[in-house]
Amino acid sequence: MSSTHRGLRIASAIVTLALAATACGGDDGGDNKAGGDKGKQGFALEGTKGGTLKIVGNGDADYLDPQRTYSTLGFALQRVLNRQLLTYKAGPADQGGLEVTPDLAKAMPTISEDGLTYTFELKDGIKHQDGAEITAKDIKYGVERSFESDTLSGGPEYMKQTLAGGLEYKGIYKDPKGLASITVEGDKKISFKLANPYADFIYIVALPTTTPIQAAKDTKDKFNVAPTATGPYKIASYKPEKEIILDRNTSWDESTDSVRKAYVDRIEITLGVDTADITNRIESGDADFSFDTSVEPQDIARIKGDPALLENTNEVSTGCTRYLSLNTKVAPFDKLEVRQAMQYAVNKETYRTARGGPTAGDFATSMLPPTFGQDKVDVYPAPPTGDPVKAKELFAKGGYTGGKVLMLATNAGKGLASAQ
């Protein structure tokens, strides 16, 4: 009932910026081939600095607030705006891009024998945008504000689920004493105590959740439109749904950062651009890169047939799975047989056509996409066009004879056609 989507990305040499996404997104690595010289493209080539990177896309980030974002673009922006205790190495997945590495931390954590306590020591000389040195207390505060689900909804809740006392803690605004399972020792040491051993905790630490925030600079829900930075770039201006402009953060010290290269001086992101116009802007040289995952189906054959365009095109598996979510508490989906019937009733082929055809992705047979390396599993085998006979049989077993079902969907982009 789902479709992993794989898109054709038009991408010039700006892969040197390492705008890698980790949420519902994949590696944008490619071959790091330059699409032209600096004067023509307007941005720096690998190993040099200067120029402006022009990015175009359709939708905005969900949030710019590091503790609230949980989207591909949001995570990509945090990659250059902020630093965490750990982060992902730069590069394609097969070149280490899925490995976490120290960022604010001097080294990977020291883990207690019982697997419950992770301790990090911070590097010296890493600063906030205003020049103040980052402390362990700032990281603790940043994590604790992520628990503010009422005021700051949106972000991942893995810290809440894994830290001791996390499920009871209501957030730093409601409980200024803080969470007892996050302790600091001086300015440079921070420890996290887990409720139970969890081997993947280092990946939670690498999320924007551990971005340090100065308590005095926290404007709560207003922080989203003007967040401060700890990475190589800062927000120069932000017009929601229209544009995001990033300039260099002069407080960022390259010598403390082994991941981010920050070649360009300025990043201009234009939002609300439709897919066809994105392709036209990149081909004409008015834009350098798109964070959207695909071009229009009618352009794919032309691009693949043009060596010059193909050289600057990256076809990637994004690591996403599209799926229909059924409310199991509402009839008729409260019956197992009806839910099973849906697996056979849905025509995945027409859905994929609405998303752009074969280049939109392969047909999923489980929630995990192939990029996670899982074994092929197909519990409900059916042809892409569905199996109406099997579906009707299961509907009958579940006592469902027909009626209206309410479906909620976005009308942006390909959302409406996909829902129909």
Image: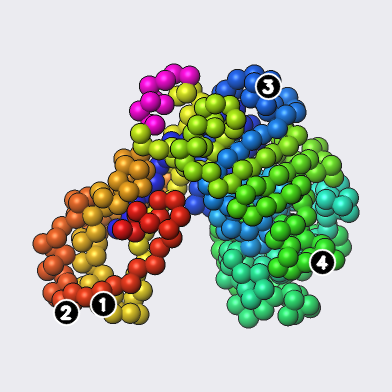
Magenta segment, prevailing SS (helix, strand or loop): helix
- Residue 305 among those drawn in magenta: yes
Dot 1: what SS? loop
Mark 1 and mark 3 residues within 8 Å of each other at the beta carbon: no
Q: Which residue is mark 1?
A: 332
Residue 227: image quadrant is bottom right
Q: Which residue is mark 4?
A: 215
The part of the chain drawn in magenta is 299-308
Q: Nearer the viewer, residue 97 or 16?
A: 16
Q: Where residue 290 sits: x, y (%)?
A: 54, 38
Q: Earlier in the sequence, mark 2 or mark 4?
A: 4
Q: Disc 1 to disc 3, how far (Cα)?
A: 59 Å
Q: Where residue 359 sits: x, y (%)?
A: 35, 39
Q: Which residue is mark 2?
A: 399
User: Is 224 left or right of 388, judged from the image as shown?
Assistant: right
Q: Where residue 212 sits: x, y (%)?
A: 76, 58
Mark in front: 3 vs 4:
3
Give the class, few, some or many, for how many residues have Cα within 10 Å of label 2's Cα (few <14, many ≥20).
few
Residue type indicated by callout 3: Lys
Mark 1 and mark 4 residues within 8 Å of each other at the beta carbon: no
